[in-house]
Amino acid sequence: MSSDNHLIIGFVPLLDCATLIAAVEEGFMAQEGLAVSLVRETSWANIRDRLMVGHFDAAHMLGPMTVAASLGIGHPTMPMIAPIALGLGGNAVTVSNSLWQDMFAHGARLGADPVIQGKALRQVIAQHKQARRPPLTFGMVYPFSCHNYELRYWLAASGIDPDRDVNLVVIPPPLLVDAIRDGQIDGFCAGEPWNTLAVEVGAGIICAITQAIWRLSPEKVLGCRADWAQRHPELLAKLIRAIYRAALWCEQPEHHAQLAALLALPRYIGAPTETLRRSLSNQLRYAIGTSLVHIPEFFVSARHAATFPWASHALWFYSQMVRWGQIAPSPEAQQLARATYRPDLYRQALLNTDVQPPMTDFKTERTTDHHFSLPGEDALSFAAEGFFDGKVFEPTAVDEYIRSFA
């Protein structure tokens, strides 16, 4: 636990821990008078448990984890908050070489639209059923994760029942490459650099990026216990400011080589420097031996209010928890989910700076093909975003949204 201005923060080795690493290594925490110890963990369950029992003051967390903890799903109830986000996007679905060959035979192509890839996967699954073969197994990093919900969203929109047609299992991010290489799973959904590393060792092919499934989708947050935040409001405000400035630094292309070298250290991610630099620069290789592809906005650390904790994102997570039977719907649960994301604390921490955060807590998630601004907030620009199937999430009509799914 914290002592004066010394904080202990947990993280999992993924590309989007970059903001935390930079905040410490590049002096943004020190500028706020904070001394921070970063602790590397292998699994999200470890992060959850150590934060709950007070080993960590705050942590690099999956956005839905904070909601699930506050709702007491799958473990004891512990109110959590997410006062700042750590970026948007950065995930992908990788499949084994053998599954890709089967999908390719049914029309899948490198870099193709998720509709095409999903149709091919559905046909492969139908063949498996006809031949009475075991269902395909896909790994995801945690039951309450964007990866789980994005994977399920893509599968369901493609006519594949995630609970009946495939087998979904939880595997910590650093173990996914070994699992797919050893044939334990047929695919996985995870953040970078684990998709790229699977490709580079010849273990898999990136068949869909979540940027194509839900452009500028929410991802990790800084999470902390609500009672800790109440006891240490000034420390939390300093954390928010340091992370915000670090996110701006991380986004500058001239810093990517330096940042990649930091992330490559064994105490952080421990992946090859060049691999991490490419990921930071939004460059992916779908398969070994193919050319690099530049994917604009694949991972965003600061632009388009990427650090803003939209309460509407928390409500979308809640909608998926209800959709997939993780919790029964209720007005009380919906309100608890919404209260987990704290844009008020974000604004308060940045009040006397030159930052102009959004003044609304909610944003409708709809498919757009162009940059846009929110009503009354012309100073903020958002990139094209939305779901690949064209559905609209209106945060003022969550129940109707849930009922819109079969």
Image: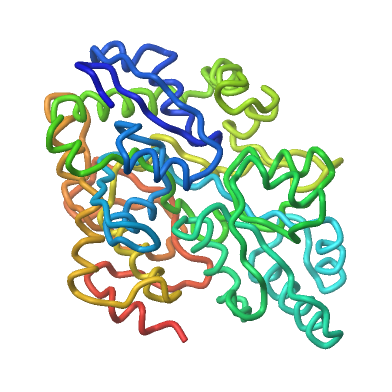
Which one is nearer the viewer's eye here, 351 or 367? 351
Tell me if 381 is positioned left or right of 46 in this view.
left
Query: Residue at coordinates 85% horizontally, 69% vertically from top-left?
Result: 102
Pick whichever, 220 or 306, lies toward us. 220
The answer to whether residue 246 is left or right of residue 111 is left
Residue at left offset 59%, top offset 22%? 260
Q: Position of residue 226 (x, y in %)?
A: 20, 44
Instruction: Tell me where residue 322 sits by quadrant.
Output: bottom left
Q: Position of residue 308 (x, y in %)?
A: 29, 43
Picture quarter containing residue 26? Answer: top left
Say if 310 sits above or below 241 in the image.
Answer: below
Residue nearer the viewer, 96 or 132:
132
Placement of 103 over or under 14, stated as above or below: below
Q: Quadrant for residue 364, please give it.
A: bottom left
Residue 370: image location, x then y, percent: 43, 54
Residue 138 horizontal side relative to residue 147, left or right? right
Q: How far across and down, in percent of the image, does residue 181 sit?
A: 81, 48
Q: Is residue 93 left or right of residue 393?
A: right
Give the colour scheme of this rendering: rainbow
